[in-house]
Image: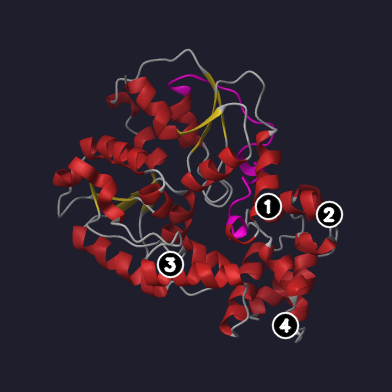
Amino acid sequence: MNESDLRSILKCVRCGTCRSVCPVFDVIGWESASSRGRMLVAHGISQGMEADKGVFDSLNTCTTCGLCEQMCPSGASPVKVIENVRHQLVLQGKMTDAQKELRTEALEKGNPLGETTERMAWLGDSKKDVTEKADYVFFAGCLASYRYPELTKRTFDILKKFGVTALQEEVCCGSPLLRTGSDPSSLMSKNLEQIKKTGAHTVITGCAGCYTALKNDYPEDLNVIHVTEFLADRLAEMDLKKLDLKVTYHDPCHLGRCNGVFDAPRQIIKSICYLEEMKSNREKSKCCGAGGGVLKGYPELSLELSKNRVEEIPKDVDYLVTACPLCRTNLKRGGPRVEVLDIIDLLEMAMG
C-alpha cells in the first residue's frame, strides 16, 4: 500500500458519516459494507491480513460511486484506497471468479461482455460517413456498441452533422478493469493508437464509465467531453420542439459526482420539457448499483440497489432519463414504473 493510501486511511476518524449515505451499507447493514469498515479492512491487508471471502465481499461490494467521499468531513478517499487494494490483491493472484472472468473477457475479446461479434456493426449504413480525420471523434464504448447499437447509431447520426467522426476500431476503455483491480494498459494503448490516427483534439463519449476512464485514467492527457456537453453547446442549431412531458433525471456517478457534469444534461432536458428532480440529485445522487464490478460480481445486491434508486422516481413523471448505458441497464432491472430513456432518446423526440 502506498503512502497516500495510508494517509487517507488515517484521515478516517470513524465518525460513521459514510454509513448514513452508502447505498450498499443501506442494503447489507454490516460494518464491513461501509466505507469506514472497508478502510479498516484495507489497513488490515496492508498489515498482512489474509484475504478470505469476507475480505473480498467487503472490498468488492463497493460500487465506487464516491458518495462517501462527497460527504466525508475528514476528506478521506476511500474509493481510491479500495481500488488500490483490489489491485494489490490481483497482483498477488487473489481475486474472485467474477474478477477473473471480467478481466479475461476484456483482454481477450476486447470487451467485458464476452461478445465476439463485430464491435463496430452498430454503424450500419453510417459507416460511409466515418472520415479518417476530424477534430472530434466519438468513442462508443462496450455497452453502447453491443447492447444499444440502434441508439448508438442514432447518437452518431446526430454528432456527424457537427463534423464528428467515429473510430475505425475500438476496444474496452478499461474502466471495468480499473475499478476491479486489473491492468487495462494494453486496451488503453490500442484505443490511444486509434484516437491519434484521427488527429482529433477532442474525444466524445456517451458512457459515464468510459468518460471517467478516458479523462482521468489514461496515460496521456486527452480532451474528453460527454455527449451531453457537446450537444448542450449546440442546442440553438438543432431546432428542437417543446414536448408536453415531465421527466426526471438520474445523475450517473462517474459523470456527475466524479467529474462535475451536472448542468449539460439538465440544459438539454429543460430545453425540451419539464424536469422534476429526484429526491437525491446532483452531488448527492444515489448510485444505480451497477458500478465497481458489483453488477458482475453481486447481481442480487446490484438489483436491490437499483430498486432503492427507482423508488425515488417522482410519482407524476412520464420518463426516467439518464446519460449512461450502464445506469440505464441497471435502472431497468429495478422495475421502475416508467420507461428508462437515454437522453438521446428524449432529444430525438424533440427533433421530430
List x then y, in percent, for residue 52: 75, 78
Q: Amino acid at mark 4?
A: Ser
Secondary structure state at the residue bearing disc 3? helix
**Mark pair 3, 1: CA separation:** 23 Å
Q: Amino acid at mark 3?
A: Ala
Q: Earlier in the sequence, mark 2 or mark 3?
A: 2
In the depicted structure, whether residue 45 falls above or below residue 136:
below
- Report which residue position mark 2 lands on: 29
- Report which residue position mark 3 lands on: 106
**Mark pair 3, 4: CA separation:** 28 Å
Q: Which residues are magenta?
A: 270-295
- Report which residue position mark 4 lands on: 46
Residue in the image at 35% along x and 35% along y = 231
**Mark pair 4, 1: CA separation:** 30 Å
- Report which residue position mark 1 lands on: 300
In the depicted structure, whether residue 56 falls above or below residue 289:
below
